[in-house]
Image (spheres, grey):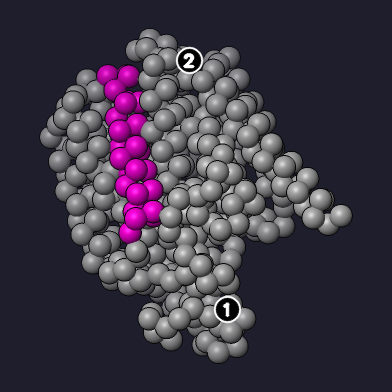
Amino acid sequence: MSLSSPPASPAAYSEASPHHEVHEVAGQAYTPLETGGAIALGVIALLMANLMSLLLSALAEEHRLSASGIGLTAMLEALMAGLVTGAAGIVLKPRRLRLIAAVASALTVVANLATMNVSGDGVMLVRTLAGIPEGIMLWIAIGLISRTQTPERWAAVLFTGMGITALGAATLLSAVILPRGGASGGYEMVAFAVALGIPTAFCIPNALGAVAGTGGEVAGAPPPRGWIALFGTLCFASSLTAVSIYMVPLASQAGLSVAVGRSAVSVSLACQIVGGVLATVLAGRVRYINVFWGCGLAFLVTWIAYALKSPAWVFLAVSGLTGLCTMLSAPFLLPMTIEADPSRRATMQSGTVQILAGALGPLLAATMVGDRDVHGALALGAALLIVGLAVVTGLHRLAQVERRRAAA
């Protein structure tokens, strides 16, 4: 089946397509290499999101960035990536993706190498520019995931791969690269990792089709209820990034060593892998609202432990719990947006909003922290979490009422 063929139903693919093809992706069957390539590209695009805390904190330790600069720089890079991903999802047609992905990967490599030689405002400028190609790469991966029949499962695959990659990278950074090469060595390592996106670009589909099983396109702006769902996503995800970006400083201000803070990041990433696997298994089997409330309680427990200046083993344990729940809850944001907007236009923007949350959380946190005290990020995280859970719960109950009326 060629990429220009008109989309057919998933049932038609299961009867007519070869068994080695992935049937539910993008409205037409692709090979596992093409599908895996698109997911891998998303993993590469999101690599920096999980390493920001380590790398920006290292810049601050070298007096190349202030404490508030940590949050502002993380905000600028994530904001640019999110805006680019969202704009591309609304405006661009997914064509010539291999060339686009290769160029975006190369530009990201250049941005990471350039970060090695800048300080202060220069760091903020370079990292902001880095968000442009990162957003393009993520747009391609999100485009594929949004066109699947079970987007939460494919999102969980993406997040699990991201967790495994980030764990390896964070462990290498903490144990070897940062102690020996400092922040510049860390960004050099990331540049080499991102360079893998160039050959990966030639493995992805060159174009994406319509939504699986609907024949409809997902380009365009969401309806009003879709925007409300995206607002809930923004609050929920922002609460996590507002706190996680200050994990290392929180450990230091709890009387723990920098090594404990860096280890907490690694433990969190390791547990994210478990959370991603668990999300893959639970996809389609549990209600998303139960996942959100369970994970929300876990986040609050973790932040209370941070505020109470817990001993090292408690700090590491709750950081692991947060990592697991972060990866477990993230994929279930997709069925939440689908319930609110069955056209999946909001689903196409869900990844974008999660990236923007990576900007909004640190931005708001930067206004509530200082060089000597970053605990204001914890109160902010709790407030955003409560608002996000309230929005998600309200939308779910509204959908339940409508289903009961339709059944009656």
User: Which amino acid does the dot numbered 2 rest on?
Assistant: Gly
> Which residue is painted at 65% across and 57% down in the image?
283
Q: Do residues under tags 2 and 1 come within 8 Å of each other at their CB atoms?
A: no
Q: Specify whether residue 72 is painted magenta.
A: yes
Q: Quadrant of the C terminus?
A: bottom right
Could you say where residue 220 lies in the image, as x and y percent from the top left? 43, 55
Which label's residue is closer to the chain start, 2 or 1? 1
Query: What is the secondary structure assignment of the residue under circle 1?
Result: loop
Residue 36: in sight, yes or no? yes
Could you say where residue 397 lies in the image, as x and y percent from the top left? 74, 41
> Which residue is painted at 65% across and 31% down in the image?
390
Of marks 2 and 1, the one in the foreground:
1
Q: Specify whether residue 256 is painted magenta.
A: no
Please, which residue is most extreme toward the left here? 117
Kindly identify which residue carries mark 1: 9
Q: Which mark is residue 182?
A: none
Q: Residues within 10 Å of mark 1 (few under 14, many from 20)?
A: some
**Left or right of 341 on screen, residue 36:** left
Could you say where residue 348 lies in the image, as x and y percent from the top left? 47, 54
Q: Main secondary structure of the magenta part?
A: helix
Distance between mark 2 and mark 1 Cα atoms? 51 Å
> Which residue is painted at 27% across and 69% down in the image?
96
Q: Nearer the viewer, residue 310 or 226?
A: 226
Q: Nearer the viewer, residue 327 or 363?
A: 363
Kindly identify which residue carries mark 2: 376
User: Which amino acid does the dot numbered 1 rest on?
Assistant: Ser
Q: Tell me which corner region of the image, top left, top right, bottom left or bottom right, holds residue 173.
A: top left
| Range of residues picked out in magenta | 66-92
Could you say where residue 114 lies in the image, as x and y percent from the top left? 15, 41
**Left or right of 103 on screen, residue 260:** right
